[in-house]
Image (tube, rainbow, N blue to C red):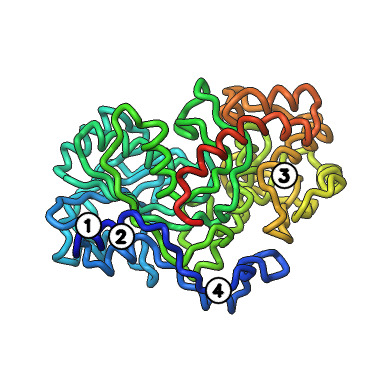
Amino acid sequence: MSLSRRTLLATTAAVTATAPASAAHASPAGGASAAQAGRRRVRTGFERLAADGYALLDGQRVGVVTNPTGVTRDVRHIVDVMHADRRVDLVAVFGPEHGFRGTAQAGGSEGRYDDPATGLPVYDTYLKSGRALADVFTASGVDTVVFDIQDVGARFYTYIWTLYDCMEAAALAGKRFVVLDRPNPVTGRRAQGPVLHREFASFVGRQPIAQAHGMTVAELARLFNGEFLTASPVPLETVLMTGWRRADFFDGTGLPWVPPSPNMPTPDTALVYSGTCLFEGTNLSEGRGTTRPFELLGAEGVDGRWAAAANALDLPGVHFREAYFAPTFSKFQGKTVGGVQIHVHDRAAYDPVRTGIALLVTAKRVWSGFAWRADGWIDKLTGSTLVRTMIDAEAGTDEVVGAWQEELARFRRVRERYLAYR
């Protein structure tokens, strides 16, 4: 591969237009129809890397940070593909939360083991950062760390902070870093929600970005390097997609969906997640242990008044159904609870973060048993005390959402500098 071709592969922001601009909003729900989705062809960063003969990795001992979402169009895992290809010197795999092969539930990982399929050593990155993670990279013997994981577009989804931690650790260990891009499944049209305050930094939010960031992982990597790792930026290369547009939902890409984690079964889950994950910070079930996590919310003692109150707000793009369910694990395991199911009927109009706030506000008003988790988890999820204290003070949805607009506007200006797809 020539130098100009290598540069193009690493940095190009070109997007191949394969459908009319309105295609992503053609169905009644505001997304691409099945026929339109079938005609679209988004090429992921890995597809472009492989098509170029892995020239970007030539002469490098390579380690890959990935999970079950790191697949080809025909759902072969990229680790299996690269391991079988003599053009790649693949020597290690690094697993995030839930593990490389995805066997662990939320808050768990697979530990250190040798992968039975390839014999490759698999190292655990979960809850490791800084020098401890740099030591893992050093011990693995890699020259280049490659990242390929499907994100879902929410600040508190931990894979983007695995990306951040691995970039920081690679810089400390003197390693090169390559990000293979994949779509933001809920579009990259805009950033929404409150911005993290640094005093609330945790593994569900290391740095001040918006709750729904509206970026791809390659764009985030550029932002991390340019804004937060300035003292020691990692040698970074990004392999961008072609064919992806910022208004595309996942079903408009023509790519297969693999659940990024056990409680993210479908792109519909991802669509609501950046708002309804806030219920992790309450004593209500966020739907874990059901077939519709984050779309079903409820608790013992909740009845139809909640759905009625939420529907009365006439929020754009969404209806709420009175629902009853019995989680098989997590909160209220084995008990029948009442609540709501979220039905998004217009994805283009739907605002997941605003909807999540509205559901918190109405739940607190109609159910006397409402409470925040005692460990302050809601503040880590929202990034500050603002949401919790305003809702406790009986603020309405518009007041809460209005309170973060200034900080969101600042983040949007920063974000704009790192967008690769126009």
Measure how far apart labels 4 and 1 are at the Cα level. Answer: 30 Å
Tag 4 residue: 19
Asked if residue 23 is positioned above or below residue 203 in the image, the reply reads below
Measure how far apart labels 4 and 3 are at the Cα level. Answer: 30 Å
Identify which amino acid the numbered label 3 is placed on.
Thr
Front tag of 2 and 1: 2
Which mark is drawn over residue 9? Answer: 2
Measure how far apart labels 2 and 1 are at the Cα level. Answer: 8 Å
Tag 1 residue: 56
Q: Residues within 10 Å of mark 1 (few under 14, many from 20)?
A: many
Mark 3 and mark 1 lie on one chain; the one further toward the N terminus is: 1
Tag 3 residue: 355
Mark 4 and mark 1 lie on one chain; the one further toward the N terminus is: 4
Q: Residues within 10 Å of mark 4 (few under 14, many from 20)?
A: some
Measure how far apart labels 4 and 2 are at the Cα level. Answer: 23 Å
Identify which residue is drawn at 78% across, 22% down. 393
The answer to which of 416 and 98 lies nearer the viewer is: 416
